[in-house]
Amino acid sequence: MNSNTNQKINQVSEKTLVIGIDIAKRTHYAYVVDERGRVLQKSFPFSQTREGFDTFYERIMTLRAAHEKSDVLVGFEPTGHYWMNLAAYLSAWIPFIMVNPHHVNRSKELDDNLQTKNDQKDALVIARLMRDGRFSYPRLLEGVEAELRNGATLRGKIQEDLNALQNRMIRWIDRFFPEFMSVFKQFGKMAYAVLEMTPLPKDIQGKSPEELLFLYRQVEGLKSPQLPKAKQLVEVAKHSIGLTEGLVMARIEIATLLHQYKLMQHQLDALTEQLIELSKEMTDYEYLSSVPGIGDVTIVELLSEVGSLTQYEHPCQLIKLAGLTLRENSSGQHKGQKRISKRGRRKLRALLFRVMMPLIRHKV
């Protein structure tokens, strides 16, 4: 047992009121035990409202006085986003801690040897894990770090929506102009211009490459469309196997998709610029930007995931946060293969992989 665990166990003394909370969307359940795990108060509910939080606080103070405890330790497992409001409330009054959901899931059968799961039982399991020092100290983000986390999350959602829109456009192309993808392997400015001005093969048939270029130059942002691509379009449009029925609604569909895509892309670009400016307010930005191959967007994503690097005392903390610690299954003479645990932030693992690729190319 390491010294950090010993410190956590020492934090729970005979003067400590230990309260485990099972978090839910509307109603939370709390269980109160002492330093030895003895039940002082069986499970009781309180609502996810200001009134419910105030009632919970008053009850804690009553229990502390009744059992002559000077300290209070509140803990819960981070379930989705529902814990955040309670954590923000408690941060001004009572110290609180986090219990790993994996530990709760694996420990719930110790008392009754049953797979039963309910809010009251989980609250007791959480309280007893806290008593044993099996918890971690959370860190609520503030200021720029909180803005970056929220902004990066929003940016990721917009990027997912953009990918979904692009997939819908590909589905449209497969039905009405399947030869399009043989001309444009990727969606660039000219590809979007073609979908905007001449989405169907019949719009291209009968036109010369020069006439097509004239049309595409009218699209904002496209200054010099490629003549070879226009010639390819003319050739493939002659023998297209695209659908020829329902074309009125097909035009409306692709126009709608393109409009939504342009709007979201504009929102994404504007949000990215704001996040870059926010990241520049952190002292870590200058250090990270000096590393070859790491761009502003990567810096934003990295800082939004881990916060300021100055809060970490050792690189192993970041490795554990990303779920990159090694695990193995060995017994007796059998030596198992080591693999990463993946008990950490999946997005951070993916980000670190993307960060390493340019560093390898630059031989940093």
Image: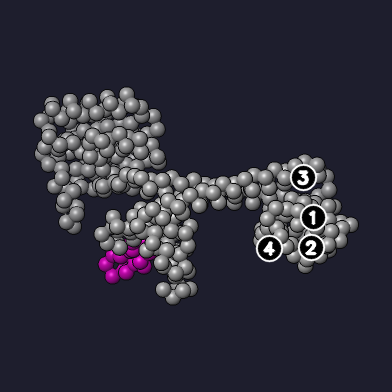
Image-based side of 264 in relation to 290, left or right: right
| Discs 4/2, front | 2
Q: Give the alpha-carbon distance from disc 4 to disc 2, as whole Å.
A: 14 Å
Residue 109 showing in the rendered view: no
| Discs 3/2, front | 2
Image-based side of 49 in relation to 360, left or right: left
- Magenta-drawn segment: 323-340
Residue 300 showing in the rendered view: yes
Residue pointed to by mark 4: 185
Mark nearer the N terminus (3 vs 2): 2
Residue pointed to by mark 1: 215
| Discs 3/1, front | 1
Answer with the quarter of the image where residue 42 lies: top left
Are dots 2 and 1 in contact, CB under 8 Å? no
> Mark 1 belongs to which amino acid?
Leu
Mark nearer the N terminus (2 vs 1): 1
Q: Which residue is drawn at 48% across and 49% down?
A: 274
